[in-house]
Image (spheres, rainbow, N blue to C red):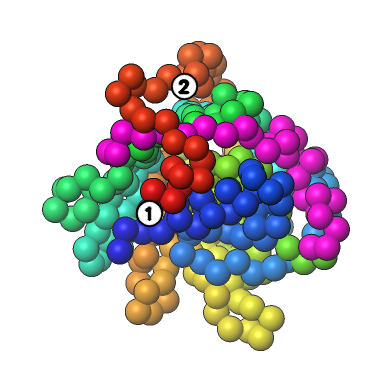
Amino acid sequence: MNYLFEHFKRYRKDLFIGVTVGLVVGFVALITGLGLQPAMASHPKTLSSIADSAPMPELPITDQSSVEDILTLMKNSHNLWKTLNADVLTVWQPAREPQTVYTNIQIEQISKARLTIQQYNNDNKQMFDVLWVSDGEKAYEQDNLSKRYTEYTLPTFAQSVDDFGLQSNSSLGDSVIIRHPMAVLIPSPIADYLYPTGLMQRQGKLEVLGTDKVSSREAVVIAWVGFDEKGLLTGKATFWVDSYTGVILKALVYGGETWDDVAEETTIVSIVFDKEIEAEVFAFKSSPDFEYLPLEKFYNH
């Protein structure tokens, strides 16, 4: 199985519904691509109110910080940086037939981003080569293997964390997860590590394991175990949380034949916060020999 491709299929289905019909139900309720089942959690109506629901802890967090302080930092993470540039290594099913994904991602908050993704199987054959760019108004996706690309206007909710949430659709009820809008739009599970507020709204138990360094940055290591309303295990992961920003610098996600099997290992191998990114980075220009396809045809292909 191509695990990244399966994530893209789910992402594209939700995105196409959201862009063409204007719904945000799938965006709000789902956390995709992480190998973990989403668990519903009660919370206020917007990401801002979630972030403001508890006072910010003293930084940096440490292994002596309370679970509540670590959660608060992660729910505020998107407020603690303006830009980032990161190189990320992901290995799916590392103990079996590993598939390796190399990702570079550059973000300027709130809605500009550039993402390159290249995936290889265990024989080092390239399976995936995608460019995704958001200039703040439109998003562009280019498949470098098939030489096709598409574009679409960003949904209005991409421009503000306060325009994205339960007030967008009152029929959703109170017990849903609200992800950051760019965690929804960026077509990679890495987005939920860079915007961890959605992950931290899930039901479950957190335990502080200690401290470590990832990409030369101090991190607090936490274990997360998720349960449903009946107490059944729904997910298991270990996260290395940046001590100053709350960004997840490394993740081990478990699942497969047993909950002790590592299904995904993602590591941010380099990351720079709050360095100015040139405007050209977020300007998309396709190659002359690439074919444009409308959104629906591109995704069906």
The reply to whether the magenta stretch includes residue 213 is no
Q: Position of residue 159 (x, y in %)?
A: 71, 32
C-alpha distance separating marks 2 and 1: 23 Å
- Image position of 39 with respect to 142: above or below: below
Q: Which residue is mark 2?
A: 284
Q: Position of residue 6 (x, y in %)?
A: 41, 59
Q: Indicate the quadrant containing the N terminus: top left, top right, bottom left or bottom right.
A: bottom left
Please state if 288 lies on the left or on the right of 13 as rendered: left
Which residue type does callout 2 highlight? Phe
Q: Position of residue 127 (x, y in %)?
A: 26, 48
| Few, some or many residues within 10 Å of mark 2 (<14, 14–19, 20+) | some
What range of the chain is rendered magenta?
A: 145-172
Q: Nearer the viewer, residue 227 or 27?
A: 27
Q: Nearer the viewer, residue 42 or 301?
A: 301
Q: Residue at x 55, y 65 (%)?
A: 224
Q: Which residue is mark 1?
A: 5
Please state if 176 lies on the left or on the right of 9 as rendered: right
| Few, some or many residues within 10 Å of mark 1 (<14, 14–19, 20+) | some
